[in-house]
Image (cartoon, rainbow, N blue to C red):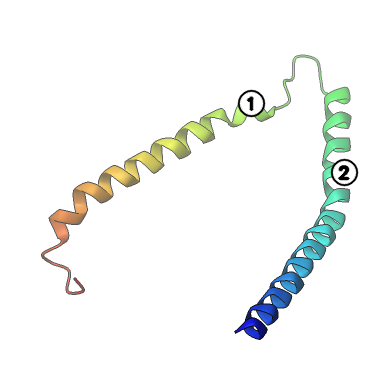
Amino acid sequence: MEKDEERLRRKQASADRIFYYGIFVFTLICAPFYYGAIKINIFVNERAPEGYRFPKIIDLSWCIVAAIGFSVMQLVLDKISRPFFWHICKEK
């Protein structure tokens, strides 16, 4: 019994190590892209025509509101339609 627990503990430690190495490599791969995106954003904002408003992160508020609205609609429709179609479903 103790051997199984020890083996499981070693496997978990190995999996944790692999996961952390994967996160590290993923960060190393993504960092240049994030840096490039920030540099492009600064470049565009500095050279934008007068009166041009470059989109900001706050402009995504409509997307966030729509996502929340659609999620609520999905939950409500699921609660309403499930009892309505329950008798038709063959896999009860």
- Image quarter (top left, top right, bottom left or bottom right) of the C terminus: bottom left
Residue most extreme to the front = 2
Res 36 label: 2
Q: Say which amino acid is labelled 2.
A: Gly
Q: Residues within 10 Å of mark 1 (few under 14, many from 20)?
A: few
Side (left or right) of 72 relative to 91: right
Which residue is at 87% across, 42% downward? Answer: 35
Judge whether 17 appears above or below 82 on screen.
below
Give the mark, 2 or 1, whose residue is nearer the N terminus: 2
Judge whether 38 appears above or below 23 on screen.
above
Please name whichever residue, 69 or 1, is drawn nearer the observer in this view of the structure: 1
Q: Position of residue 67 (x, y in %)?
A: 47, 39
- Image quarter (top left, top right, bottom left or bottom right) of the N terminus: bottom right
Q: Quadrant of residue 10?
A: bottom right
Q: Position of residue 82 (x, y in %)?
A: 20, 55
Query: What residue is disc 1 on?
Result: 58
Q: Position of residue 76 (x, y in %)?
A: 27, 43
